[in-house]
Amino acid sequence: MKNLLRRKDNRHKKLIALIDGEHYPDVTRDALAMLKDCFTGSFAGIVFLGGSEKLVMDDLEDYFGGKVYIISDLDHDFTEALKHFKPDIAYDLSDEPVVDYRSRMKIASFCIARGCSYMGPDFLFESQRQDIRLSVKSISIIGTGKRIGKTAISSYAAKLYSEEDIETAVLAMGRGGPAEPQVIKGDEIDINPEYLLGLNRKGLHASSDYIEDAMLSEITTIGCRRCGGGFAGDIFMTNLEQGARIAESLGPDLLIVEGSGASIPGIDTDARICVIGAFQDWTSIIGYLGIYRIILADLIILTMCEEPMADSNKIAELEKEIKKYNPGAAVLRTVFRPKPLSNIKGRKVFLAMTASPAIENKIIKYMEKEYGCRVASASFNLSNRQELRKDLAASPAFDTILTELKAAAVDVLTRYASENKKEVSFIDNIPVAAKRGSSFKKELMGLIE
């Protein structure tokens, strides 16, 4: 880490040091002197994070030889300290018990959200750059994990914008995306089981998010790929910039840029939506820089806001924590409701989803009541091929497979249906506002106005 501090490109950068009062003052003072000696840029000041067991609080600035900003409440004061010093790098000389790993992840989130890298003796969180610029209006949709409904939100948002005569396209990236960005015109191509099986036979990922978006929204989508995902969502390899240029050339009124898992597209969009699963534990969100993602957002969508996924107390606590870090963002509670893309009235179905088995009875009752089908058997193992095959083999007789478009939906279920003369119908998961007075469309339109 000392070598990083000595880099020539630091010459025009500002550094602050984070200290605590648990180290003996002379130890901290000597460490600060070493830090200043190592750094090739300018030293802006010191942030005191707390702990006074071994520290006399008088004359800190004279003793340490620099401006000192004292933190009383990390969640509020640290961001103010960053505004005060405007550093490029924050170097952490503190330690347990004043700063534990949760506190450090918060500090990392605050730093990189303001373009400041966060360093310590054995770690570096560099400020992330969304440096791909677009010439069209754009919104990015990011998330705090996988299986939280980000693609469903993306495709539904595209559909709502299109209904308002806003020509919308989706740029999506995935772990199974194409080596060269691919364009699908969802309003011109019939994305049916035969089409998907054809892609599968060619060795292509037939359920990549851009295909799902095109099928569900019937709009133009551009598919890209990515590999790797860091704590702050940075990506090791992607062809996203190439895909972005293709998207621009198509001339949409609005481009929705869809993240993958917890990864963040490196595109400077006009607005951002952050999707959070209400079932997610707040401690885990803190633990991998989820706060950073929340700070970036203009609109935050909580999905699966219903029992048994999350009770009202947990949802209220999530909202309270979110508002602490991003008071300016609107928070929208939603639940998903499945909608078949074809008529299944009177059909006897095998239902396959990635949802939690905890809501099996609720989903089955909803499907049978709303769409007049009979669910012969349900499997919530769509992301586990081995278990899915077992569920398929154990199912009572059925004539139709009803499934979300995921990888196993093509290479297991659609192939099974083709070989056994069964029909296949795909599901769209529709996000519905779960709180009275909330409007999904109103919030989306507000982002582009």
Image (spheres, rainbow, N blue to C red):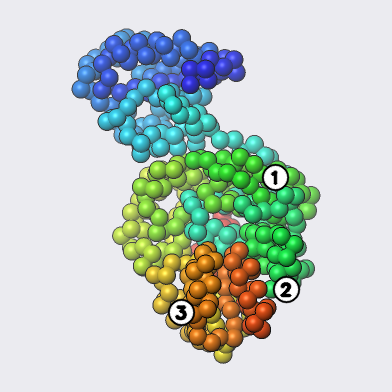
Spatial CA span between label 1 and label 3: 40 Å
Disc 1 marks a residue whose amino acid type is: Asn
Spatial CA span between label 2 and label 1: 28 Å
> Residue at position x 37%, y 22% from top?
93
Mark 3 or 2, which is nearer the eye? 2
Task: Using the rendered image of the protein, determine whether residue 134 is visible from the camera's viewpoint.
Answer: no
> Residue at position x 36%, y 47% from top?
283
The circle drawn on residue 71 is: none
The residue pinned by badge 1 equals 239
> Residue at position x 49%, y 69% from top?
387
Q: Are marks 1 and 3 in contact (CB under 8 Å)?
A: no
The residue pinned by badge 3 equals 364
| Farthest bottom residue in view | 346
The residue pinned by badge 2 equals 194
- Mark 3, residues whose alpha carbon is within 10 Å: few (<14), some, or many (≥20)? some
- Mark 2, residues whose alpha carbon is within 10 Å: few (<14), some, or many (≥20)? some
Mark 2 or 1, which is nearer the eye? 2
Q: Quadrant of residue 304?
A: bottom left
Which of 59/91 is in front? 91
Q: Are marks 3 and 2 in contact (CB under 8 Å)?
A: no
272 with respect to 247 (left or right): left
20 with respect to 395 (left or right): left
> Residue at position x 29%, y 11% from top?
26
Which of 78/278 is in front? 278
